């Protein structure tokens, strides 16, 4: 019996194998962080969007913060879909203290449908008054093999 090394595969097979691994094994969850003004207020968002398709169907256009119960942060994020058909995506928030340490567990994934050319608002309240910052993760529900969402 002859054992074949993966390095002895034809070049086209190696390219095909690489394309399959890239399309199925990559984490293509988009991440949104608040951009802060000198006074600490939200002055926009910074988006890391490795999944360009997801960015066109669930693009964050605005983020706002407020305080509830006297000392707990609440976040509202507006998300716009540039698509001509309804789309599905999942999202979750992560919460951090002033030193960048995660507070509480990550929120569970929530799934949403967005209509064509629609803007929707998602919101969340921090799990603790010690929260000073947040990250929003957006994942593609239609193609879960390209994301970290369940």
Image: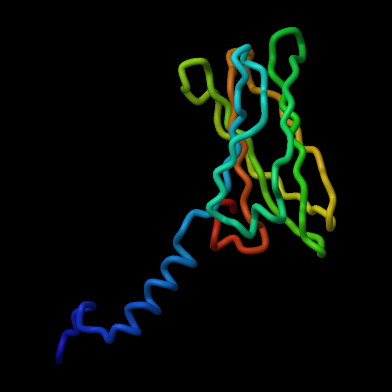
Q: Nearer the viewer, residue 70 or 120?
A: 120
The residue located at (62%, 37%) in the rendering is 136
Q: Position of residue 104 (x, y in %)?
A: 55, 25
119 vs 14, left or right, is right
* Image position, residue 29 (x, y; %): 56, 50
Q: Is residue 42 something one can see in this rendering?
A: yes
Residue 108 percent coordinates (x, y): 63, 40
Residue at coordinates 57% horizontally, 34% vertically from top-left?
106
Q: Nearer the viewer, residue 57 or 110?
A: 57
State whether residue 36 is above or below residue 31.
above
Q: Quadrant of the N terminus?
A: bottom left
- Does residue 148 sit above or below 47 in this rendering? below
- Between 5 and 66, the residue placed more toward the observer is 66
Question: Does residue 107 appear anywhere in the picture?
Answer: no
Residue pictured at 80% horizontal, 53% vertical: 114
Q: Position of residue 57 (x, y in %)?
A: 72, 55
Please tell me in which quadrant of the rendered image residue 72 appears.
top right
- Looking at this view, name the residue that lies furthest to the top: 70
In depth, the one of 95 and 3 nearer the eye is 95
- Left or right relative to 125: residue 101: left
In the rendered view, does 39 fall on the left or right side of 116? left
Residue at the extreme bottom of the image, as rendered: 1
* Depicted 8 relative to depicted 67: above or below: below
Can you name the residue that lies furthest to the front here?
A: 38
From the viewer's perspective, is 20 left or right of 33?
A: left
Quadrant housing residue 122: top right
| Quadrant housing residue 73 | top right
């Amino acid at each position: 019996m002859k054992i074949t090394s993966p390095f002895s595969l034809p070049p086209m097979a190696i390219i095909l194998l690489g394309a399959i691994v890239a399309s199925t094994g990559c984490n293509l969850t988009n991440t949104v962080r608040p951009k802060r003004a000198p006074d600490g207020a939200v002055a926009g968002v910074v988006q890391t969007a490795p999944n360009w398709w997801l960015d066109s169907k669930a693009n964050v256009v605005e983020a706002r913060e407020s305080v509830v119960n006297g000392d707990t942060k609440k976040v509202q994020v507006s998300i716009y879909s540039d698509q001509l058909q309804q789309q599905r995506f999942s999202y979750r928030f992560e919460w951090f203290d002033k030193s960048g340490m995660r507070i509480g567990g990550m929120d569970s994934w929530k799934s949403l449908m967005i209509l064509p050319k629609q803007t929707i608002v998602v919101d969340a309240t921090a799990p603790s008054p010690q929260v000073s910052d947040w990250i929003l993760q957006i994942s593609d529900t239609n193609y879960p093999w390209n994301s970290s969402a369940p």
